Image (cartoon, grey):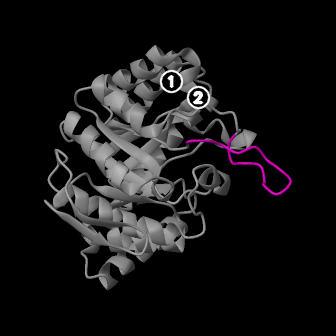
Amino acid sequence: MKLTVDYPSVAFREGPAKVLELGKALEDIGYDEIAVFDHVVMGFPTDTRPPPMYPPKMPVLEALILLAQLAAVTDRIGLSTEVLVLPQRQPVLVAKQISTIDLMSEGRVRLGVGVGWQESEYDALEEDFTNRGRRIDEAIALLRSYWSDEQIDFDGEYYSSTAMAMEPKPAQDGGPEIWIGGGSKAALRRTGQLGDGWMGSALAKEETIVASVTAIRAAAEAAGRDPASIGLQMMLQPPPSKEEDKAYYADHDQVVQRVVRLKELGFEWVSLNATAVFQAGARSVDAMIEQLGLLHAAITAETA
């Protein structure tokens, strides 16, 4: 079982040095990967806009710049996005940014992408929220073309490149793996048709998890792909909104049991959310490092 940690925005409260110290500590503990999440801006509620999922003034560092910083202070640990909201970004620029991070980190990048949920963020970035599903499908193909082809000739409905080149290529042949986040029917279909893997997020009911994996595999078969080639990852618990759920990561036995069951269901990766670890009582970077170390030891003892 491979373990990734979804990076906490709350680490920034203690300053830039502590943000990077956490990354180095996760590598020292033995985690397989650091994952960063993506929000550029957050919208305040208005007369026509509902309250966002997270506080509008929550500090969120830019995902790819943070990933590059973490690459510079680590040597082994993998680097991923969980997830990058690809349709609100220009995909050729993303191809270059990810290629550069992968090259400079010597092939440690895994790219998780999704369509996002915050329409106001799309508005601020002057991107169309309504067609984001169709655009992400096309953007994935465009990324792979820029990472693989000597000359890029791409003629899509939303994006096009004619007689273009991008050098240097990523360290990984053909570019980093692209994993798809989300639990909608469209996201599951997209995973089966286009993704190297699926990043699920805390689906509590086992029957929902099984049904989602079944849908992914059916979409893969329909696309002529080998369903067994598609990786599976589940986030154990995102930052909870209900007070009674905030102690989840404080119960290490509960966390370990969940990981063991996910392994039995065929998942190769689990993601621990460090912000939720903070909410469970680890109220500083040092405390998060301590708790994440204990969790890593407990999980690996049962799943190695």
Residue at numbered disc 2: 278
Instruction: Residue 212 in the image: state x and y as whole percent.
Output: 47, 70
Point 13% across, 59% down: residue: 150
**Does residue 269 sit above or below 276 in this rendering?**
below
**Does residue 55 sit above or below 228 in this rendering?**
above
Query: Do residues under tags 1 and 2 come within 8 Å of each other at their CB atoms?
Result: yes
Instruction: Residue 107 in the image: state x and y as whole percent.
Output: 20, 41
Q: Nearer the viewer, residue 71 or 210?
A: 71
Residue 231 numbered mark, or none: none
| Element under disc 2 | helix
Point 78% across, 54% down: residue: 50
Point 26% across, 82% down: residue: 224
Instruction: Residue 48 in the image: state x and y as whole percent.
Output: 82, 57
| Element under disc 1 | helix
Q: Is residue 129 visible?
A: yes
Please report whichever mark, 1 or 2, sits nearer to the chain's N-terminal start.
2
Q: Nearer the viewer, residue 90 or 59?
A: 90
- In this rendering, would 239 be left or right of 302? right
Within 10 Å of disc 1 (Cα), the crowding (few <14, some 14-19, many 20+) is many
Which contiguous range is marked in magenta? 40-54
Instruction: Residue 67 in the image: state x and y as whole percent.
Output: 37, 35
- Residue at the far bottom: name it: 222
Residue 288 numbered mark, or none: 1
Identify the image quadrant of the C terminus: top left
Amino acid at the residue labelled 2: Phe
In space, the residues marked 1 and 2 are separated at their CA atoms by 6 Å
